[in-house]
């Protein structure tokens, strides 16, 4: 009976060790869950960025208004007959 009790106690200690410190331990699983959640958040952010860029590409491909707006903002272009005012702070 003592041998059986010793074997069961040893098995309990061994399993607890594996649960807390071995491969696939609870802290490791919790860390993986945190990493997965962080990656999901990053994926959502990147998906939104991609959607914005895709909308901008479609807008640039379909119309001249977007191209003109882009040229005005990025390159400072002005139409003929317009006066450009730059205000310095």
Image (tube, rainbow, N blue to C red):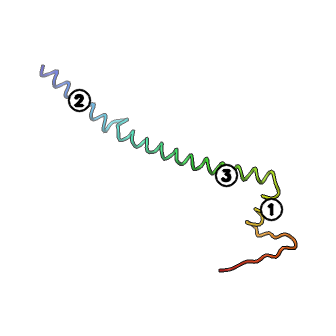
55 or 12, nearer to the observer = 55
The residue sitting at 87% across, 71% down in the picture is 80
Residue 51: x, y in percent? 66, 48
The residue that appears at 70% across and 79% down in the rendered structure is: 87
Side of 20 where 69 appears, left or right: right
As helix, strand or loop, the secondary structure at mark 2 comes to helix
Using a 10 Å C-alpha cutoff, classify the residue at mark 1 as few (fewer than 14 neighbours), some (14 to 19) or many (20 or more): some
Residue 46: image x %, image y %?
59, 49
Of pointers 2 and 3, the one earlier in the residue sequence: 2
Of labels 3 and 1, earlier in sequence is 3
Q: Are marks 1 and 2 in contact (CB under 8 Å)?
A: no
- Which marked residue is nearer to the observer: mark 2 or mark 3? 3
Under circle 1, the secondary element is helix
Q: Which secondary structure, mark 3?
A: helix
1 vs 2, front mark: 1
Task: Please state, as top left, top right, bottom left or bottom right, where the C terminus lies in the image.
Answer: bottom right
CA–CA distance in space, label 3 to label 1: 19 Å
Residue 83 locus on image (x, y percent): 82, 76
| N-terminal label among 1 and 2 | 2
Residue 52's disc is 3
Disc 2 to disc 3: CB gap under 8 Å:
no
Circle 1 residue: 68
Q: According to the image, label 2 marks what residue?
A: 12
Which sits in the foreground, 84 or 74? 84
Left or right of residue 38: residue 57: right
Residue 35 is tagged as: none
Which residue, as the protein is rendered here, is positioned at the far right?
80
């Amino acid at each position: 009976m003592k041998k059986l009790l010793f074997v069961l106690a040893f098995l309990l200690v061994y399993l607890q060790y594996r649960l807390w410190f071995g491969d696939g331990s609870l802290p490791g699983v919790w860390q993986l869950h945190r990493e997965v959640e962080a990656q999901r958040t990053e994926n959502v952010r990147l998906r939104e960025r991609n959607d914005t860029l895709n909308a901008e590409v479609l807008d640039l491909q379909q119309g001249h208004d977007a191209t003109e707006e882009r040229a005005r903002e990025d390159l400072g272009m002005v139409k003929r007959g317009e006066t450009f005012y730059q205000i310095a702070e």
